[in-house]
Image: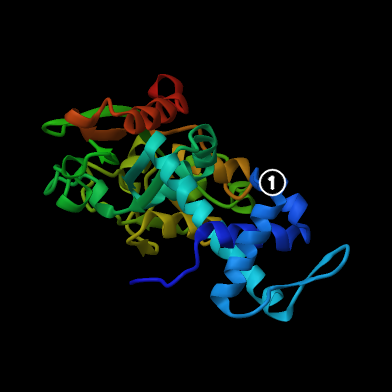
Amino acid sequence: MSYRLPPLNALRAFEAAARHLSFKNAAEELHVTPSAVSQQVKSLEDDLGMPLFQRLPRALELTPEGAAMLPKLQAGFEALAAAVARTRRLAQGGVLTVAAPPTFAQRWLMPRLAGFTKAHPEIEMRLSTSLGTIDSLDHPEPEPETDPRHAANEVAIRFGSGRYARLRADRVFGVSYTPICAPALGETLRRPEDLRPCTLIHDDTIPDAEVRPTWEMWLKLAGVAGIDAQAGPHFSNSGLAMEAAIDGLGVALAPRALATAEVAAGRLVTPFALDLPTGQAYWLVCAEAFADRPVVKSFRDWLLAEVPGGQL
C-alpha cells in the first residue's frame, strides 16, 4: 500500500506548533529556529491547499481544519513511536514463545508472570496452552505443535518423566497429589475416613493412572476402605475439576503445588497432610542448540529461581 503524505518534518512542525500554539516553543522542542518551523508549516498548508493556523499579532489559533487534523496526526505519531520502541526492545531482547499445560499456566505460572515481565521488559512473551505438553504412556514425546525443537526461541513446560530425546530438560518441581475442597467443606474433614459422605471429583485430563494418580490410589495410601472411588462427577480438564471444588461441589484430588494460590486466597483448603507422591514433575524443556540464547536463559533462570531447589 502506498501513502501520499506531506514531508514528515512538516507534519512534525505542525504538530509541535499546534500543541504549543507557538512557533517559538515548537522550535525549542525541535531544536530548530522559529522561522524554520514557520516555513515547514507554510509548506504543509500549501500542500494541503488550506490554512491550518490563524496568525494573530501575538498568538496562534488553529483553524477548524487544523483542529480536526491534530488529534489524528498525534495518534499517528504515537503509533510510529510505539512501533519504533517495540523494534528497539525486540532488538535488545526478543520474542519468547512458551507452551504449557493449561492448569499449570493458569494456576501456577500466571500469578508469578508479572515478576518476569517486570524484570525483563525487553522480552516479549507469547504464552500458549496445550494438552500436548502433558506426557501420556502412548505419547511420551512432545507433539509437533509443542515441540521446542521446531522453533529457535521456543520453550515448553511439560508434565511428565523428563526423558525427552535431544532436548534440554530442567526440573521445575515434582508433583504430589492431595485432596482439595472449599473451606466450608474442609471444616467437616478431620480424618480421611470423613470423606465417606463426600462427593469425589475426578480429573480425567490424563487417562493413565501411572501418570496421574486416582482417588483409588490415594484412599489406599490413606488406609480408607468402603468408599466408591469411581463415583462422582468426572471432568476432562483439571482446571474444571479445581473450579468444581472451589464451588463446593465436592473434594478433588489435585497437585498440591497448583492449589497454593487458591489456598492462599482462601478459596480452597487442603484438609489432610497426606500427599500421594508421583514419579512425574514439571519440566522446562528446550532444544539443546537454543538453551543458552539470552531470552531462553533469562526465562529459565527466573523460572527455576521461583522454586528454590526444584521443590515446593
Horizontal arrangement in the rendering, residue 248 relative to residue 21 (left or right): left
Horizontal arrangement in the rendering, residue 276 relative to residue 15 (left or right): left
Q: Is residue 180 above or below residue 198?
A: above
Residue 186, position in %: x, y? 59, 47
Q: Is residue 185 above or below residue 299?
A: below
Residue for point 63% across, 73% down: 69
- Residue 43, by quadrant, is bottom right
For this orientation, the residue located farthest to the right is 58
Q: Is residue 255 visible?
A: no
Residue 226, position in %: x, y? 38, 50
**The N terminus, quarter of image:** bottom left
- Residue 124, by quadrant, is top left
- What element does badge 1 sit on? helix
Residue 39, position in %: x, y? 63, 60
Near-viewer residue (47 or 18):
47
For this orientation, the residue located farthest to the top is 309
Q: Is residue 265 above or below residue 131?
A: above
Horizontal arrangement in the rendering, residue 302 relative to residue 29 (left or right): left
Residue for point 45% across, 26% down: 307
Residue for point 52% across, 47% down: 194
Near-viewer residue (213 or 59):
59
Residue for point 54% across, 64% down: 76
Near-viewer residue (148 or 158):
148
Q: Which residue is mark 1?
A: 29
Amino acid, disc 1: Glu
